[in-house]
Image (cartoon, coloured by chain):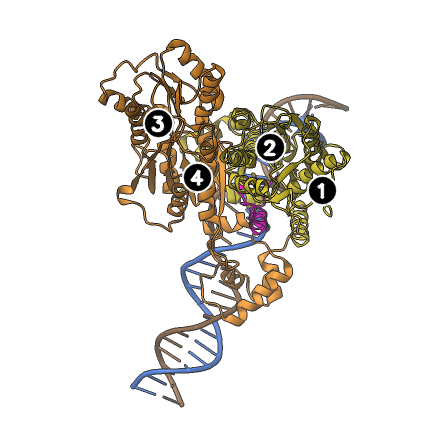
Chain colours: A yellow, B orange, C blue, D brown
Amino acid sequence: MTVTLADVAARARVSPATVSRVLNGNYPVAASTRERVLRAVDELDYVLNGPASSLAAATSDLVGILVNDIADPFFGIMAGAAQTEIGGQEGSGRAGGEKLAVVCNTGGSPERELTYLTLLQRQRAAAVILTGGALEDPAHIAAMSAKLTKLADAGTHVVLCGRPPLPGSSAVVASLAFDNRGGGRRLTEHLLALGHRRIGYVAGPAERTTTRHRLEGHRTALAAAGLTDDQGPLTVHGPYDRRSGYKATLELLRRSPDLTAVVAANDTVALGACAAVRDQGLRIPQDISVAGFDDLPFSVDAVPALTTVRLPLHEAGARAGRLAMGTEAPPPGGIATIAAELMARASTAPPRG
Amino acid sequence: MTVTLADVAARARVSPATVSRVLNGNYPVAASTRERVLRAVDELDYVLNGPASSLAAATSDLVGILVNDIADPFFGIMAGAAQTEIGGQEGSGRAGGEKLAVVCNTGGSPERELTYLTLLQRQRAAAVILTGGALEDPAHIAAMSAKLTKLADAGTHVVLCGRPPLPGSSAVVASLAFDNRGGGRRLTEHLLALGHRRIGYVAGPAERTTTRHRLEGHRTALAAAGLTDDQGPLTVHGPYDRRSGYKATLELLRRSPDLTAVVAANDTVALGACAAVRDQGLRIPQDISVAGFDDLPFSVDAVPALTTVRLPLHEAGARAGRLAMGTEAPPPGGIATIAAELMARASTAPPRG
DNA sequence: TACCCTATAGAAAGCGCTTGCTACGGCCGT
DNA sequence: ACGGCCGTAGCAAGCGCTTTCTATAGGGTA
């Protein structure tokens, strides 16, 4: 049998109530008693029964972080930063702050997103952080709103990180939204300024906010330059992975041999795009410029170094973590927009001729 | 107030016991009754109270996956595969299999590793998967052994994935160990076969099993070729990140200008190494060959494509997930070695001259 | 010296669920 | 036709903790 609170109480010659209070540190306990209890805890190697504690206290120390793809550093960086902010501190042995920050991988599937939310609701999670772009399907948005409202009603803090505010729901503590539109616009403006006019765009999955916003920024820049034919042939959608970038770029090159630049939905896709360009015997950036988005750590090491848009993923994740913990005050209106910075590097240059 | 089992029972005009049994599906319930209960659950939008359930049943549906660095795809791929295997199935609505697979980021810190284990023990986790190399500090190993034994005693399945079996502890369901030694050996043999004799090695942190095993493989190959001067000057240790690869390579190049190849502890480090080589005005592979380890997805897109050692991360993670769930039988002796395959690509070539 | 207030500890009532055991029809076997 | 068994459902006893309320010393005050 495992050691229980009662065992510790017996050994310390106090009541279970006192042990509980020592462990939670939320009630005055004489120093001598505390010490006795702590010693008993140590000697018996006692570990609190989480479920029992959560049941009695009607709260748990679980914090869920939902990500679309755990194998993608984009999410890994945010999740890691958030997790550090949540679980790291409170060096002083016991005491309240001991939260269990866990990341859940939805794989981009709306069902799994909902499933995880239910599971976390079941565990009476203290907080939930949703990262990355959202699906724009109305049914799913409604389901999410409902779920999040229920979570919030049960006392769970809900924080969005890198995801636009949910329309219907005021259940959310805070939304940290990346300026995908602005970043996308500035990236394309950079290309236009270099002299490009035929720019291909390898977009992400069509139904995601991130995809749409980046694409909108791109088109805004195009429109401002008087370019209008961007709608159909120069845009290809696909998942956020290298294979998609590779295939889409091949397709783009086939459709429009006069292309001088390719903008990818993110850095990973851009890597695939680069591979495709090279496999066609074209040089980067002399023949074709390529650009990405996110500025993941490997982008600076690409050859040539990838022009991209930097998102402060680490900072954003850390802030989301603090928001979830209640350590930081929410931004005014609960919404903050996080700036995206253009990183012009070697993969973009003026078009040939 | 939230909806409880009793509310559902009242609405379905049955006893709470019956509702519980319907939900758990582990006791015969008449079809008509089941249907009535299920309808009530739906109508009331009931969500099980996890802590209460775990307390009463003395088990929980939490499965923890510990990783050293969540921002590193090496771990992300394994964790994602394991998580899919654990949480994904059981499409039929309710029923038992609904586990909550969560990943915990230790950041490579032994304290956090232990802390997470305690937290999971507290939650009475159903299983724990430890991924990646272990720290070789005796004190930490002892602490881990003790902790894992206690977890196992409490019924938690413990699985190691990409980590060598723990010496003292038989508490572990299964260990899936990568053949880091063999992979490291074959990689260096490849370089030797190409004609290299002065090979630099950028190793990982000194106190990790992964680091040591890969390095041992390297030295075994060297020794077999009659090369012995590898000990000191040609090996540099550092963390598993690009910056480390960059700095270490610069250092290596400075120490031994006659170097013709650099082997990195993993692909990420190799990327940094490549950057350093290029920044020195040297060409890959004409002047210097570079090789990595792991064969992460981006490695094939490096320029030139990176020679490396492929580890079946996805398969290993999935298998670990199944082992944790008890869906797959453990390998004989509880230990399986997972083969590492040499991927000779364009970043390695015969030395100049 | 008597009284009240503060500081500290204990008693006990749950928290919402699971499950061993009991209860109760109807069907079978002889 | 009757006893027993099978198939279902309910009762009630916890699971191990938190927390409200109550009890008991001291110590200060008048």
Tell me the tag on residue A321.
none
Q: Are marks 1 and 4 on the same chain?
A: no
Q: Which residue is disc 4 drawn over?
A: B78
Mark 4 or 3, nearer chain start: 4
| Number of disc labels | 4
Q: Residues within 10 Å of mark 3 (few under 14, many from 20)?
A: some
Residue A130 to residue B261: above or below? below
Quarter of the image where the N terminus of chain A is located: top left
Q: Which residue is disc 2 drawn over?
A: A292
Q: Which residue is disc 3 drawn over?
A: B209
Tell me the tag on residue A229.
1
Disc 1 to disc 4, C-alpha distance: 43 Å
Of residue A101 and residue A111, the one placed in the foreground of this image is A111
Where is residue A112? Give x, y as percent: 55, 49
Amino acid at circle 2: Gly
Q: Are marks 3 and 1 on the same chain?
A: no
Q: Chain of mark 3?
A: B
Quarter of the image where the C terminus of chain A is located: top right
Disc 2 to disc 1, C-alpha distance: 22 Å
User: Residue drawn at (74%, 41%), measured in percent from left and top?
Assistant: A228
Amino acid at circle 4: Met
User: Residue drawn at (27%, 21%), measured in percent from left and top?
Assistant: B222
Q: Which stretch appears magenta? A: A104-132
Q: Tell me: B199 left or right of B305.
A: left
The answer to whether the residue labelled 3 contacts the one labelled 1, judged by CB atoms less than 8 Å apart, is no
SS under mark 4: helix
Q: Mark 1 against mark 4, which lies toward the viewer? A: 1
Disc 3 to disc 1, C-alpha distance: 57 Å
Q: Are marks 2 and 1 on the same chain?
A: yes
The answer to whether the residue labelled 2 contacts the one labelled 4, judged by CB atoms less than 8 Å apart, is no
